[in-house]
Amino acid sequence: MTEKRNLKMARSAHAYVRGSTARFYEWLDASGATELPAGPTAWICGDCHVGNLGPIAGTKGQIVVELRDLDQTVIGNPAFDLVRLALSLAMAARASDLPGVTTARMTENLVAGYERAFEGEVPSEELGDLPEPIKFVMKRAARRTWKQLSQDRLGGLEGKLPLGKQFWPLTPAERQAVEDTVNGEQARRLVTVLHARDDSSKVRLLDAAYWVKGCSSLGLWRCAALVEITDPSKKGAEKRTRSLLDFKEATNTWAPASERARLPVHEGERVVGGAKKLAPALGDRMGTATMLGHPVFIRELLPQDLKVELDELDSDDGKRVASYLGMVVGRAHARQLTGEQRSAWLKELTSHRGKTLDAPSWLWASVVQLVGLHETAYLQHCRRYALAATPA
């Protein structure tokens, strides 16, 4: 799994962003790193790159763009999320061979979108108002069905997980722990929280397997559980549907917490707590458990849950995407703050700007420094881990 993670990180400089969260914070903490402002204390994503944003299905059937991966969530400085997202957008621009001036404009638009959320504006979910890359993924999400999710994740198998490269057998003890959790009241509440399912539905485990998935989290304990939900209707008939649950180990964060932050002792509760604040559509669909000594968080995977992909960008799309995602992250931060805190943070953001760049000087300086460090580390990573695996 370590080899798999290293090869995934070597696919592109932008892919390297996803797996280098620990190094990101090491670089920020390094001697000579740009001094970031002390923003208001709030729940932050902690790993706010482009791939961790995307459409999320809410419990009432709505689809919204929110943060979708909260493994690193912590109570800390919102400036960390801004820098992390700005770096991710800069690497996406470089991967699309866009000029440096576009990266500068994208950084400006990111901040402008972020600030609009603090001024009371919210991202429009109307397709006509969305940047093309966001519109594309939203249309995909709206059309997706359980059958497509089953085909993508399970190869279309009925009632079984396909063992192989992606799914590995569980030990008997792991299987029993999963079954005990699925049979518990919390799992039943988790899968019946959706408006289309009755609260009295019964849940039964069909199959479970270790899930080889992710990038920075690859190697942690993770499990996929295929369950059947029996939903009694008002007429007395029974309706059976399938659901795929994702059990994921929660560990200590690399993102630094505020010194005064009081975080849950159970790491899974930390993840769910942050999700409820930052991404309510996702947080309301999550639960926690302790399985064989592992603190885990659990969520049902829905067909509409997708991530934003920025494989090819033009300049105009890049700037519009930066503004939109900035507003999404700004909304996640702003909803947690008082009016006084929002005003103070907005004033801080607007007070460090030069004559030629409409973005805080500390943010641009951080991006420039981190892009250089990131490029060097990425090339060294490729030489160390991917060269031998690539034919001459």
Image (cartoon, rainbow, N blue to C red):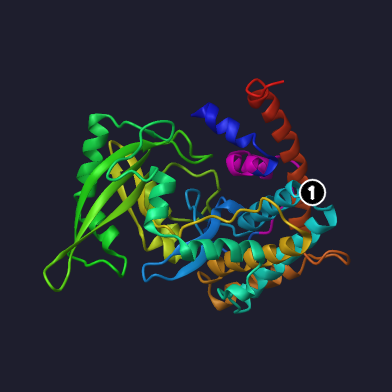
Label 1 element class: loop
The image position of residue 75, as x and y in percent, is: 50, 56
Q: In the shown orientation, is residue 138 left or right of residue 240?
A: right
**Which of the 4 quarters of the picture holds residue 191?**
bottom left
Residue furthest out toward the right: 355
* Magenta stretch, residue numbers: 15-37
> In the rendered image, is residue 265 in sight?
no
The image position of residue 314, as x and y in percent, is: 76, 58
**Which of the 4 quarters of the picture holds residue 241?**
bottom left
- Of residues 204 and 278, the one drawn nearer to the viewer in this rendering: 204
Q: In the shown orientation, is residue 330 left or right of residue 178?
A: right
Q: Inspect the image, locate mark 1, and give the three-letter code of the amino acid beneath it.
A: Asp
Task: Name the residue at 47% across, 48% down.
Answer: 71
- Of residues 183 and 311, the one drawn nearer to the viewer in this rendering: 311
Which residue lies under the disc numbered 1?
Answer: 97
Numbered circles on residues, count: 1
Find out whether residue 251 is within the magenta segment.
no
> In the rendered image, is residue 389 in sight?
yes
Residue furthest out toward the left: 236
The image position of residue 322, as x and y in percent, is: 69, 62
The vertical placement of 295 against 45, above or below, is above
Find out whether residue 27 is within the magenta segment.
yes
Q: Assess disc 1: are there few (<14), some (14-19) or many (≥20) residues with their C-alpha within 10 Å of its C-alpha.
A: few
Q: Main secondary structure of the magenta part?
A: helix
Task: Name the residue at 56% across, 78% down.
Answer: 339
Q: Quadrant of the C terminus?
A: top right
Q: In the shown orientation, is residue 128 left or right of residue 352?
A: left
Q: In the shown orientation, is residue 153 left or right of residue 54?
A: left
The vertical placement of 130 against 3, above or below, is below
**Which of the 4 quarters of the picture holds residue 172?**
top left
The image position of residue 389, as x and y in percent, is: 62, 23
